[in-house]
Image (cartoon, coloured by chain):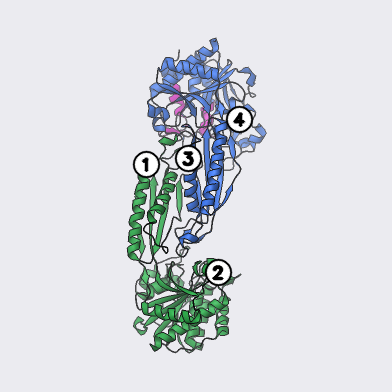
Chain colours: A green, B blue
Amino acid sequence: MIDPSRFLADLHALRAIGTRGRGVVRRAFDAEDVRARLWLAERFAEAGLTARIDPAGNVWGLRGPLLIGSHTDTQPEGGWLDGALGVIAGLEVARSNPEVSVVSFQDEEGRFGATTGSEIWSGALTLEAADALTDLDGLSFAEARRALPSTGPFPDPSDFSAYLELHIEQGPVLDQAGEAAGVVTAIVGLRQITVTLTGAQNHAGTTPMPMRRDAMTGLAAAHAAIADALRNVARPESVWTIGHVALHPNAPSAVPGRARFTVQWRDGEADRLDRMETAIRTALAEAAAATGLALEISETSALPPTAMDPRLRAALARAAEAQLPGRWREMPSGALHDATNVARLMPAAMLFAPSIGGISHDFAEDTAEPDLIAATRILAMAAADLLTT
Amino acid sequence: MIDPSRFLADLHALRAIGTRGRGVVRRAFDAEDVRARLWLAERFAEAGLTARIDPAGNVWGLRGPLLIGSHTDTQPEGGWLDGALGVIAGLEVARSNPEVSVVSFQDEEGRFGATTGSEIWSGALTLEAADALTDLDGLSFAEARRALPSTGPFPDPSDFSAYLELHIEQGPVLDQAGEAAGVVTAIVGLRQITVTLTGAQNHAGTTPMPMRRDAMTGLAAAHAAIADALRNVARPESVWTIGHVALHPNAPSAVPGRARFTVQWRDGEADRLDRMETAIRTALAEAAAATGLALEISETSALPPTAMDPRLRAALARAAEAQLPGRWREMPSGALHDATNVARLMPAAMLFAPSIGGISHDFAEDTAEPDLIAATRILAMAAADLLTT
């Protein structure tokens, strides 16, 4: 059904565009990204698909109603498989299945926005609004997309019946378990708040301990209180992180007067995200009160969880069990993907290949060759299954 | 004995040099600091003292064997009394006591070093080594001191029998207790380490909680462990602070792979500083082990505690009780002072005036006028007492 050596040759040919050591650099609309997208359009045409570049820079290989894809742009220090794997696997599946179309969405990695190309196609972001987005150097999406002129309009979403996306896991779960594939249950939702604890900045020599209102003490208390509060609310898949911390004045001889930090949590269920939020806010209030600090919490940034379509999931699960009996699992996706946007338009599902050592967004990112081939076979088998049932 | 209105007039005349709102800016050897030092030399001469500017920029009013002083340079945003109070009080005492000499040490506030002028005079720092010190703009002490040419050599320390220094407390203890003076028992010693906890930087969405080695979790655990460990070792005067924290990569969506932070502790007894250090290092090792992080601890920076001379302390205590019966206390100095250096050469002791709200190193720093006058009277009485006994 699929030709492993042809598939791997395509994957390495794409890797050669923007290659840096073992990794790649193809930022959305930079010279290498444009080269890769033009190369991809040629491969689509060669495979008998109708190649099209839409106004957002998404590259399409159009033929059948089952859409398979991901993205070919990368992080500033990107791995060779992140995104590229799902696109090239789609191409390989489409070669032997005329009911399949393929897409490489633009700017999944967020040079300008976040999953920008699929967000525009899904209708969640207008092209006009996207055009005003700028990268860190001030270049606008409007200017940047001139580097890759469109060859046709946005395809009509109603021409497609379903979307499948193969992606690397970007985490350690499959690798550590010695498993070769993951069928995604949901793309987790994310919530984030910025917390400010304010006490009194003082001289670290002259201020007795009982007279201090030390924001670092508050931060430590908040971490402990959140960990404690979430023990009864979170499930094994739930995650939470204090990733960013800024103390003020942040000097060894000053009692910190202010601590500002982010608290982020993720889960596949909206209801659990709610309960985690209640627990976190209560814990923060208790920690602030216990340490005599003023508490300020920003509005919550929220991305809702996206459940994967049950019928598509089942097809992927059947194919996984056929290809890798006992060596796959169902699991949530902790990272955001283009499938989040496409799921607004049609049934969508995702398959994960293992990330060696859980490494991603790094030149060192990699996956064992047999796992790449097995994942593509699962994708091909699920596609065939879905189109005949 | 002292003339309050003359004393206050001098204090306000000095405040007018480099005045900024309610505060002052006189960085060591800047134009205003030089103006203030030349003004001070004139006041010394007027009072019948022999004025001298030594090669380090210390300004002397020489006459008798009892030396009283402090410093007239300020922080970048300095209070009007910090240092200035002790010098002008010394001048006022010297006016009616021919056995008194007065000094304003240079760069106590550390534009170039830390307590630079008194450190040079004490022999702990050579003038040659000091000349190589630079401020944050790269200006050297050697270049800077050309702005205030010396008028004589360093006075011979053996010409003096004892040193007294009046200073604002720079902390909240006296103010909160409603007391008007503090007789210093010791200038506390200080120790500081820089701690690095290293885990694994990971994606905050795709890395399950049990697989994380989160350096922020380690920092919170370290804070809790130190607080716990010091409970049985510290005394009420002991202080400790985590004042500086740097997480890496310090991004909301990344599990922190590294936390680097300072731990600083102070106490008046060397033995207690040792026991605190043992407790802190043990707590850090336990916290690192419990959170699965690698622990690295820098060498300890140490400043030893300086006990104040018992005879001088007793004279200050007698005078304080006479002037402010029941409204003074003995207390350690949590901040460093010129007396730390002078104590290497001769018996030394210090007196504190209250800081309103504990505020110092800030334009808002202040002390009630009656407390300024009472402190100067205590100084005058102790000086008279010491010179007749």
Which of the two marks, 3 or 1, is nearer to us in this view?
1
Number of other residues with Cα within 10 Å of mark 3, as a class: few under 14, some 14 to 19, many 20 or more: many
| Residue type, mark 3 in image | Ala
| Circle 3 residue | A254
Number of other residues with Cα within 10 Å of mark 4, as a class: few under 14, some 14 to 19, many 20 or more: many
Q: Chain of mark 1?
A: A
Q: Position of residue A318 (x, y in %)?
A: 43, 81
Helix, strand or loop at disc 1? loop
| Residue type, mark 4 in image | Glu
| Circle 2 residue | A356
Placement of the N terminus of chain B among the 4 image quadrants: top left
Q: Chain of mark 4?
A: B
Disc nearer the start of the sequence (3/2)? 3
| Circle 1 residue | A292
Q: Position of residue B247 (x, y in %)?
A: 50, 53
Residue B126 in view in this figure: yes
Q: Marks 4 and 3, how far apart in space?
A: 23 Å
Extent of the magenta region:
B9-37
Is residue A145 placed above or below B210 in the rendered structure?
A: below
Q: Does the CB distance between marks 2 and 4 fall below 8 Å?
A: no
Q: Give the residue drawn at x 44%, y 30%.
A: B80
Q: Chain of mark 2?
A: A
Disc nearer the start of the sequence (2/1)? 1
| Residue type, mark 2 in image | Ile
